[in-house]
């Protein structure tokens, strides 16, 4: 059935312009016409009155762990419960995102590659869900960040085998742990630790590049970030100690950033059950993270929004809107924030020809907001309706 959405104010996330009192024609889940005023159509299309709402494209969260629960120690919980419960939780979490208008998710680390299975089930129509892209398990060093749930490697040979195995299993992108993290108490998990040698990273990025598969990197400290930028990584996650010089190098090499600002603030809170080492390290990270974010902005690095949703003490619910608000508070313009959670994310995932903005020929993923998000990012919380692939959720 054809659907006409009338009486909406369309937000152009590329330019920041707003097309008031507009109508959108949707056919077979795709936007086929956009016009001012009303669209006169033959037949009997379903008409949705937008009631003067502001409409943005479906949002994206470029850093989630769908199998986790956001409690004090999610890694331990999934190990105790097992993969069958974990994949059900992952689906539940994915649907929670969809209901608030997050139509695209990048899962950057799951036990037993189960997020790849979830993504495949959605793509094949076995279940209905948002667009889920998955890296499967994280590639890490023995005892490093991600140990216990990731592929623990030692040397280029192991790196090549892990890469080829993940590609065989259907990973859309790959994820490496290039440095220690805040969450972790293993011997190698000191905040200044560099994990993975340049040869290991080059092996992974070179092999993945044969299949046009991008490599994401968890990288906190500066030496680890440089190690990634100089050895073929496409997207840096966190980047908490990024300096101006390395930010300029990222821009030069076309390396993007997913900053995940909010998660370290939440992790730094003293909450029972969260490992003390994580609280201490997160507290140190947040001293530097804003400056790193501003350095990336100043250098013109492409930034996409991501949250690290369901990480320790982060809560069992989506957080991309909170992340967007924080990015604005740190100095990014409201328009650029909207770009970061829509078209920028689509470009990093190379699906910008079909999503990321409201244009003729793109998928009909629409989020209705009571008030103007360009004026105030807090209006992103005022979701009144979500349409995904032409169907009202």
Image: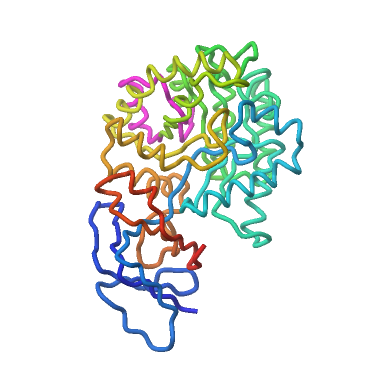
Name the residue furthest front. 272
Across and down, in percent, residue 201 comes to: 56, 26
Q: Is residue 7 above or below residue 290?
A: below
Position of 310 with respect to 112 (left or right) is: left
Is 246 in the magenta?
A: yes
Q: Position of residue 393 (x, y in %)?
A: 52, 62
Q: Quadrant of residue 284?
A: top left
- Seen at 59% across and 56% down, the residue is 129
In the image, is 142 to the left or to the right of 209? Answer: right
Total labels: the figure holds 0
The residue located at (55%, 18%) in the rendering is: 278
Left or right of 378, for residue 318: right
Is 248 on the left-hand or right-hand side of 312?
left
Q: Residue furthest bottom?
A: 43
Image height of 176 relative to 67, above or below? above
Q: Which x, y percent locates residue 21?
A: 25, 68
Q: At x 37% / y 29%, what residue is drawn?
A: 250
Residue 309 x/y as whole percent:
53, 37
Is residue 202 depicted above or below 362 in this figure?
above
Q: Which residues are magenta?
A: 230-256
Residue 100 among those drawn in magenta: no
Residue at image point 34% right, 28% down: 293
- Colouring chosen for the image of the structure: rainbow
């Amino acid at each position: 059935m054809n659907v006409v959405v009338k009486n909406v104010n369309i937000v152009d996330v590329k330019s920041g312009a707003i097309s008031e009192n507009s109508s959108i024609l949707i056919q077979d889940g795709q936007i086929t016409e956009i016009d001012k005023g009303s669209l006169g159509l033959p037949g009997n299309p379903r008409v949705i009155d937008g009631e003067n709402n502001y409409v943005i494209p479906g949002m994206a969260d470029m850093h989630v762990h769908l199998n986790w629960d956001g409690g004090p120690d999610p890694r331990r919980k999934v190990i105790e419960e097992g993969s069958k419960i974990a994949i059900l939780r992952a689906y539940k979490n994915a649907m929670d995102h969809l209901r608030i208008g997050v139509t695209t998710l990048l899962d950057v680390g799951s036990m037993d590659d189960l997020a790849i299975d979830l993504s495949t089930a959605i793509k094949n129509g076995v279940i209905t869900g948002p667009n889920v892209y998955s890296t499967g398990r994280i590639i890490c060093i023995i005892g490093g960040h991600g140990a216990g749930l990731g592929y623990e490697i030692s040397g280029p040979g192991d790196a090549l085998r892990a890469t080829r195995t993940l590609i065989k299993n259907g990973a859309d992108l790959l994820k490496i742990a290039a440095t220690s993290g805040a969450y972790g108490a293993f011997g190698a998990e000191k905040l200044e630790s560099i994990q993975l040698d340049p040869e290991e990273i080059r092996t992974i990025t070179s092999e993945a590049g044969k299949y046009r598969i991008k490599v994401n990197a968890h990288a906190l400290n500066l030496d680890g970030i440089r190690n990634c930028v100089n050895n073929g990584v496409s997207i840096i996650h966190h980047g908490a100690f990024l300096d101006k010089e390395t930010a300029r190098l990222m821009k030069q090499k076309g390396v993007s950033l997913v900053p995940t600002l909010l998660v370290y603030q939440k992790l730094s809170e003293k909450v029972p059950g969260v490992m003390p080492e994580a609280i201490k390290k997160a507290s140190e990270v947040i001293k530097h993270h804003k400056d790193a974010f501003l350095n990336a902005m100043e250098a013109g690095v492409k930034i996409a929004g991501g949250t690290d949703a369901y990480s320790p003490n982060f809560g069992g619910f989506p957080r991309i809107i909170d992340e967007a608000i924080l990015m604005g508070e740190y100095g990014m313009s409201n328009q650029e924030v909207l770009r970061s959670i829509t078209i920028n994310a689509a470009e990093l995932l190379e699906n910008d020809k079909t999503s990321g903005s409201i244009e003729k020929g793109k998928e009909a993923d629409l989020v209705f907001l009571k008030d103007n998000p360009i004026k105030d990012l807090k209006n992103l919380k005022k979701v009144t309706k979500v349409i995904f692939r032409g169907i009202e959720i």
